[in-house]
Amino acid sequence: MQPANLIDGRAIAETIHQETANRIEILKSRGIQPGLAFIRVGEDPASKVYVGMKERTSARLGIASRTHVFPEKTTQGELLEFIKKLNTDAATHGILVQAPLPNGIDQAMVFSTVSPAKDVDGFHPENVGKLMLGDRTGFVPCTPGGVHELLIRSQTQIAGAEVVVLGRGNIVGKPMLSILIQKSKHASATVTLCHSQTRDIEEHCRRADILIAAMGVTEFVKPGMVKPGAVVIDVGVNRVNDANAKNGYRLVGDVDFLGVQPIAGLITPNPGGVGPMTIAMLMRNTVRAAEMATQ
Ligand code: GUN
């Protein structure tokens, strides 16, 4: 039997897809098809899987997606030139450069070359700044945006809550903090961001009403670190070797799910929690980009 305290990310993502599909219908009735360009550099196996999933969801919802694959040895200059061409292509409303990029390419430079109006990943400094300033005209990064939707749609009390975010990455930890500290109805939390230099990290975790694990350490969050009744969100996707698995590895989160689930008030399964939400937010951002470009 399934535990009763799961936050079903797949079901919530489907609800968002339905909302997005309705918006796509309206765009199509105006003769507009949202267009999304994926750029993948090199042969990182995880990136191939992620981009493949995003392509399939785009097709299902009626977003025209196109994947541009560049060889590992592509220069930064070539990549930036290509992004600039897409920036001026009217049929492309969203551009996503899949991270990680090969060594020798400055990721920050790449993200800041994408037009802020097409930056459906929310990684351009202009969008990062808008998020921190509480300016809603920008794009919110997909994974922390998806976590926020999970909290809202599972009726989790965010305002006034003690939130602990584990991990200070630019893709999840920092934007997660920006989202949850804003003075707004579904934010206004007290957020502590912990990282590898944090003292007594377990003690911080035990105070959390909402614990968001996004530091990329296999099953870091143990039962003794979770306050009974807390909402636990597992963003981690870690590969661990497993001789019995088909590919020789399996994917494990940042939370010891079997240990923590009986203590948590609500918890995301992994897979089936945050992952589907990341894609749902990307689709929603793309449709929004198309709406804004064609108003
Ligand atoms: N790599 C890991 N997560 C992400 C993401 O949300 N967007 C992009 N572009 N690359 C990623």
Image: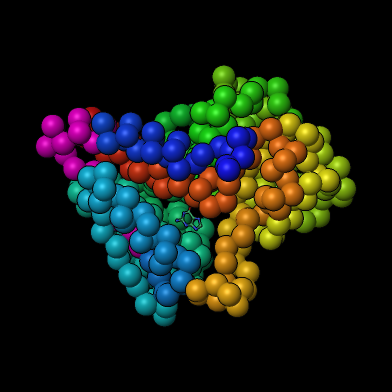
Instruction: State the residue lying farthest toward the top.
Output: 185
Which one is in front, 260 or 17? Answer: 260
Which one is in front, 160 or 115? Answer: 160
Is 29 magenta? The answer is: yes
Q: Name the residue: 74% across, 49% down.
A: 259
Which one is in front, 225 or 286? Answer: 225
Q: Which residues are magenta?
A: 23-39
Which one is in front, 84 or 190? Answer: 190
Instruction: State the residue lying farthest toward the bottom.
Output: 73
Is 82 magenta? The answer is: no
User: In the rendered image, is residue 126 in sight?
Assistant: no
Quadrant position of residue 158: top right
Q: Name the residue: 32% across, 34% down.
A: 18
Q: Quadrant of the C terminus?
A: top left
Quadrant position of residue 71: bottom left
Q: Is residue 241 left or right of residue 88?
A: right
Q: Is residue 25 left or right of residue 119?
A: left
Q: Position of residue 226 (x, y in %)?
A: 78, 41
User: In the rendered image, is residue 235 in sight?
Assistant: yes
Q: Name the residue: 61% across, 40% down.
A: 3
Q: Quadrant of the N terminus?
A: top right
Q: Position of residue 183 (x, y in %)?
A: 61, 22
Q: Is residue 44 left or right of residue 249?
A: left
In the rendered view, how is the structure colored? rainbow
Q: Position of residue 203 (x, y in %)?
A: 86, 42
Report the label total: 0
Q: Name the residue: 57% across, 32% down.
A: 151
Q: Position of residue 182 (x, y in %)?
A: 60, 27
